[in-house]
Image (tube, grey):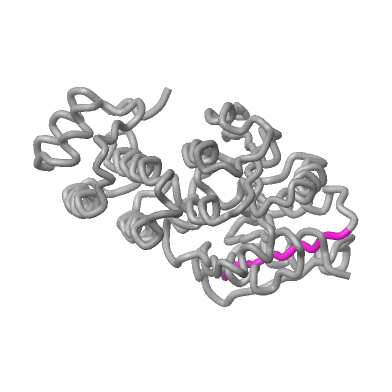
Amino acid sequence: MTPELSIIIVSWNLQDLIGQAIDSAFAQDLTSCEIIVVDNGSTDGSIEQLRAYESTATHTYKLILNDENRGLGPARNQGMAEAAGKYIVFLDGDDWFVHQTLPRIVALTKTNRADVAVFNHLEVFSSGETRNNRHTNLLKEGDRNDPEIRKTLLRNFNVAWNKVYRSEFIRAQGLKFADGYYEDVDWSHMALILATRVLASDEVVINHRKDRGGSITNSQSPSHMQAIDRFRALLEFAAENKTLCAPYRTYIFERIVRNTLTLLSRKRTRLPKELHPVFFRHVQDLLDAHDPGNDVKVRNANPLVYRLLRSGSFATFNAVKGINGLRLSR
């Protein structure tokens, strides 16, 4: 029998956390479900845990063991290649599902014949503090089939794991994750734009760890320069699909600017400071080449800092940024 849902989980050296993720998947009361775990060459004790589930599985359980860390995007692609479910959802190995939330979201997706359903998440910190998704107001339950209404969803957290996807939609569109960092950026936007029917729900389905040491978003590395490749892919997609993307171009442009300001912020340490001028120049070139031409105003960002990003020197941008700061969100 074809499973109703495929849950794809990627793990790498998560021996203290992966069990909670998988247990939360098994605990969902789904009559027809498969759980696919892709391990990216773990060197800790997590593989033994993953193998133990093969003999205790109450749902179909598939384990893919890679000899090396291929990256999150390629590992998700491996999971999708094995997925037999009518619908697909992704779970990062350090996050976990809220109990008994998936059955309702899948049923809602099916009833509304949605290609993509966007759901809510809760931010969880190592201190025990929790925080609501600040964009919850965008997820009031209902369809987002009209692009003029759907476009506000691009302001939500642009990740792969806060959505349910119809498998045939993914295959028909040939959607795959890119290699490297920020693989969610173009994937998430393209999925939302290409879908014929989109649904939103403010129900919290995933507990998302916000400050885990070792996660990509909490690491400092030159690899964060790869964001440029994903920005370019997204802007080129918009340029190649002008009619389809017309309602979304300003939102895409704004998202790239906001992500750039975050990476260049003095409050964040993802990108080594010596690479800030290089990143700045690359972004300038991209934005100049793909400017939607309607005087974009980036919400909650310092207007002077934005203007300097577009037309000023990095030295001036950096100095003004330091004086005025960056207010990226409220």
On the rendered structure, is 128 left or right of 238?
Answer: right
Q: Is residue 3 above or below residue 98?
A: below
In the displayed structure image, the side of residue 227 where residue 64 appears, left or right: right
Residue 210 position, x and y percent, is 53, 39
Q: Nearer the viewer, residue 92 or 233?
A: 233
Q: Which residue is most to the front?
A: 243
> Is the residue 127 above or below the residue 44 in the image?
above
Q: Nearer the viewer, residue 191 or 78?
A: 191
What segment is highlighted magenta in the picture? Answer: 32-42
Q: Is residue 57 above or below residue 273?
A: below
Q: Quadrant of residue 231?
A: bottom left
Q: Is residue 126 left or right of residue 250?
A: right
Q: Quadrant of the N terminus?
A: bottom right
In this view of the protein, which residue sits in the foreground, 323 or 251? 251
Find out whether residue 264 is within the magenta segment: no
Residue 312's spot in the image, x, y percent?
10, 39
Q: What secondary structure do most residues of the magenta stretch adopt?
A: strand
Q: Is residue 245 visible?
A: yes
Q: Position of residue 177 (x, y in %)?
A: 51, 64
Q: Residue at x 60, y 40 (%)?
A: 144
In the rendered image, residue 38 lying in the magenta stretch gets the answer: yes
**As displayed, is residue 108 above or below residue 126?**
below
